[in-house]
Image (cartoon, rainbow, N blue to C red):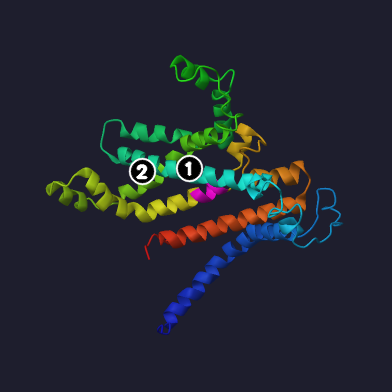
Amino acid sequence: MSAPQSDLTRERTRSAWIFLAPTLIVLLLVAGWPLGRTIWFSFTDATLENIGESTYHMVGLDNYFGAYGVFNLTVGDGFWKTDWGMAVRNTFAFAIVSVVLETLLGVVFALVLNAEFKGRAFVRAAVLVPWAIPTIVSAKMWAWIMHDQFGVMNAMLKSWGVIDTNVAWTADPDFALWSVVLVDVWKTTPFMALLTLAALQMLPKDCYEAAHVDGIHPVRVFFKVTLPLIWPALMVAVIFRLLDALRVFDIIYVMTSNSVSTISMSGFVRREIVDNNYVGYGSAASTVLFLIIAACTLTYLKVSRVDLGGDKK
């Protein structure tokens, strides 16, 4: 049974809510209203033509479980062979592989950048260049590098004897998704390295001095001292990166357009609403995407047992 709050605690709580109220109102208008409208349209047959005239009709859960709904399980080839099923599979494959690689490489780069060496400031600035380049620019640049006829990558790999003929890295279904993952890892690893480096900079030095005096191997120091201390900050970075990866759109769309072999959930939503004119169906897919991201976030926080304040529970 919790103790009753003091008058000072209640006053502080009341003041906190007063200061937070304007921000919460803005968030409600900026994020809550569009989300509510999207959920509403997901229960209708709205299109780009009738949405302005409000002549659409309610169709209930048809956009979710109907004959052409996102969760239609009656298709002959199975759910994962549908366009939406492939979009879900592509998104999770992209998110899991890219986030794992970016986290591992980010930690390695952060450890290197945290060490004392000549020219460290220049290297730190250089590492951030891929992250500073806009995603659209990076995607278009790499699309030309991986071009099957004029790309530098094919020319280099052929000169090294790795491949015999040109490979369509962004068009071949066997390579397209992993080519996008490679580009995303190149671009976003500096973000993970920067957050990890910030956590390393805040670690107490006395732990490492004691380990050095005791002659403990650096690898053991990392797993027994460094990693547990930076774990909360690292998990927060992973959470934010995971959210970003699950709603990926731009880099995949620029490099592979509307290819079914690489389309993401966000790309599927865009295609259905803009290209196919199905606002209701696209809104249903968008709502499912929102629920998937929310569920993944809550599950990840629960499994990792780390809150956003950085305290393990």
Residue 252: percent from the left, percent from the top? Answer: 60, 37
* Left or right: 160, with 268 as reference point: left
**In this rendering, does residue 197 appear at all?**
yes
* Label ID, residue 107: 2
Q: Nearer the viewer, residue 191 or 297?
A: 297
Q: Nearer the viewer, residue 166 or 236?
A: 166
What is the CA distance from the residue labelled 2 to the residue labelled 1?
A: 16 Å
* Label ID, residue 37: none
Q: Main secondary structure of the magenta part?
A: helix
For marks 2 and 1, give the one nearer the viewer: 1
Name the residue at 69% across, 44% down: 270
Residue 301: percent from the left, percent from the top? Answer: 46, 60
Q: Magenta span covers which residues? A: 242-246
Name the residue at 79% across, 58% down: 44
Q: Amino acid at mark 2?
A: Val
Question: What residue is disc 1 on?
Answer: 97
Q: Amino acid at mark 1?
A: Val
Give the structural element (helix, strand or loop) at label 2: helix
* Left or right: 42, with 307 as reference point: right
Name the residue at 40% across, 32% down: 126
